[in-house]
Image (cartoon, rainbow, N blue to C red):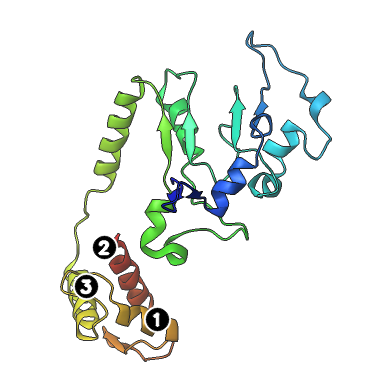
Amino acid sequence: MRPRSTGSGRCLESPYQQYLRGIKPRDTHRGYFPIDKHGRAVNSAVKRGSEFSDYDLILKNKERLLSFDEPTRFIFSHSALREGWNNPNVFQICTLKHPDNATARRQEVGRGLRLCVNQSGDRQDLDALGEDVQDVNTLTVIASESYAKFVSDLQNKIRLDGTPRTISEREEREAKVIHNYLLKNDYIDLDDHVTPEYRAAQRRRYLAALNLSGSICSAGTRRSSSARSATRSTNKNRL
């Protein structure tokens, strides 16, 4: 995000930009290296025990690491932070060493595939962000050309895994009933996008009754699992 000009030669910075400018470069990065460049184990114990040591901050004190009180924004590691390291707010990954097998690459990329959390620890998912969920939860991987085949193979695997399964006549009939229900009550538009009317009804917890296979879900009461699934599917269509 670039600073906005006021027209008089001055730029207005957002509070977050001001926060970033207040961090000294030497304080914005930490590192954890369990082995040295010769493959020998490093005695990390000499750095452990202090609340803000590199080891404890990166591997143990996740709440501190995610806090605005902690200036660390870049983490350097070697032979670490693969499986078992859980930090949901990873948005950029830069690989300095290029692994020669797909498993290691999946482990590296997997560090940034979690839904992020806010300062209260609440997961920033579809329910929290709506249509902005994919804009916020974006992972950027800076890698060499050696990742090209890995990415291509991974995309092909995702496409194959996402091949539509055969739908039964009962499921198709229920889907039509749910779709007509959403249209009739103006919960979706002609392009199958969720409407403001639906969001308002959802906030009031007062949705029209849905009669599905003899099971009636009354307005203002808990919806059936089928109705909830239809709502989730409709939300996804809008993204």
Q: Residue at x 67, y 17 (%)?
A: 35
For residue 128, side relative to residue 40 (left or right): left
Q: Residue at x 49, y 20 (%)?
A: 96
> Looking at the figure, which quarter contains the C terminus?
bottom left
Asked if residue 117 is positioned above or below residue 111 in the image, the reply reads below
Q: Cα distance, mark 2 to mark 1?
A: 18 Å
Which element type, helix, strand or loop, lies under badge 3? helix
Q: Amino acid at mark 3?
A: Ala
Front-lying residue, 117 or 43: 117
Q: Amino acid at mark 1?
A: Gln
Q: For the residues labelled 2 and 1, say whether their Cβ atoms are less than 8 Å apart.
A: no
Q: Which mark is residue 175?
A: 3
Q: Tell me the mark number nearer the camera, choosing from 2 and 3.
A: 2
Q: Cα distance, mark 1 to mark 3?
A: 20 Å
Residue 25 in sight in this render? yes
> What residue is pinned by disc 1?
202
Q: Position of residue 77 (x, y in %)?
A: 61, 26
Q: Quick one: label 2, few (<14), some, or many (20+) residues within 10 Å?
A: few
For residue 207, side relative to residue 119 (left or right): left
Q: Amino acid at mark 2?
A: Asn
Q: Residue at x 64, y 31 (%)?
A: 25
| Circle nearer the N terminus (2, 3) | 3
| Circle nearer the N terminus (2, 1) | 1
Which element type, helix, strand or loop, lies under badge 2? helix
> What residue is pinned by disc 2?
237
Q: Quadrant of residue 99?
A: top left
